[in-house]
Image (cartoon, rainbow, N blue to C red):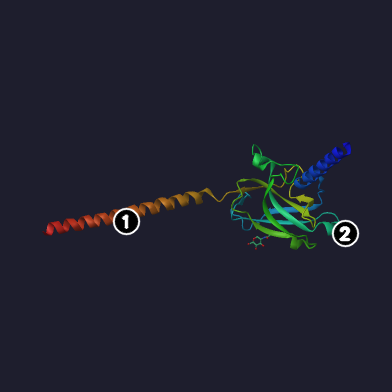
Amino acid sequence: MSSMVEFVLWCIMVISCSVAWATAGVHFSSLPNTLEVTAAINLSTATLPNGAAMAGRDQLVVSWWVKELSSSWEDSEYKTVKVKLCFAPVSQVDRQWRKTDEDLKKDKTCQFDMSEQPLHSNIKKNTIKWTVARDVPKGIYFVRAYALNPLGKEVAYGQSTNKKKTSNLFMVEPISGRHGSLDIATVVCSAFAIVSLFGFFMLEKWSAKKAELQKK
Ligand SMILES: *[C@@H]1O[C@H](CO)[C@@H](O)[C@H](O)[C@H]1NC(C)=O
């Protein structure tokens, strides 16, 4: 009887362990920092003077490569590289929805996908030009790359900033405020145009009626 109870307990333990294993993501601190990542705003097309990138318009040029001489293990293990735009700590303060979590499945640091493609040995092929997506909010950012193994699990990382995420950060500004007020002006203008058109129409009708009355 006791062996039966033991067996059931053992089963429960095995099941809960595998559930926990299946739902938990890779822990960030377990990843080696073996990728080098550079990210820069393309200054020749930048629209803002202060070195910030405008969402929906400006381009980031991002490159990545394996830092150390690639061993055969890395060659087989570093299959693809996923590149993401991430919030720097200053833009995470008081924002639970951007919080960093050790468990990569719960981590909210890197919310914007930039690229996912096979890792090439030729760095030119590991370079992308990414136009900052329109939905990227105003904030301070860096770029992080994860090497994924053939099963799609993170096995290594690299980022365009230091470990504390304080250097080489860049700012993203939303599409300029002038654009918004321009839209409002357009709406007000068209509303005014419709009202005045209607007004002229009424005036015309009214004066035509008046003229007819005078004829009689
Ligand atoms: C920056 O943008 C210009 C114009 O689109 C392009 O010709 C140039 O290659 C870009 N620079 C980089 C480093 O990608």
Q: As shown in the figure, which amino acid type bears the numbered disc 2?
A: Ser
Q: Are marks 2 and 1 in contact (CB under 8 Å)?
A: no
Task: Identify the element where label 2 is drawn.
Answer: helix
The answer to which of 179 and 112 lies nearer the viewer is 112
Residue 16: quarter of image: top right
The answer to which of 49 and 83 lies nearer the viewer is 83
**Image-based side of 183 in relation to 108, left or right:** left
Place of residue 178 in the rendered image (x, y in percent of width and height, measured from the top left): 50, 49
Whether residue 71 can be seen here: no
Toward the front, the furthest residue is 1
Place of residue 74 in the rendered image (x, y in percent of width and height, measured from the top left): 85, 56
Q: How many marks?
A: 2
- Quadrant (top left/top right/bottom left/bottom right) for the N terminus: top right
Point out the quarter of the image occupied by ligand 1: bottom right
Q: What residue does disc 2 label?
A: 72
What is the number of the mark on residue 154? none
What is the number of the mark on residue 197? 1
Residue in the image at 67% along x and 40% along y: 90
Residue 204's place in the image compared with 19, above or below, is below
Q: As shown in the figure, which amino acid type bears the numbered disc 1?
A: Leu
Whether residue 201 can be seen here: yes
Task: Identify the element where label 1 is drawn.
Answer: helix
Place of residue 209 in the rendered image (x, y in percent of width and height, measured from the top left): 19, 57
Place of residue 29 in the rendered image (x, y in percent of width and height, measured from the top left): 80, 44
**Image-based side of 209 in relation to 184, left or right:** left
- Quadrant (top left/top right/bottom left/bottom right) for the C terminus: bottom left
Residue in the image at 66% along x and 42% along y: 98
Residue 163: quarter of image: top right
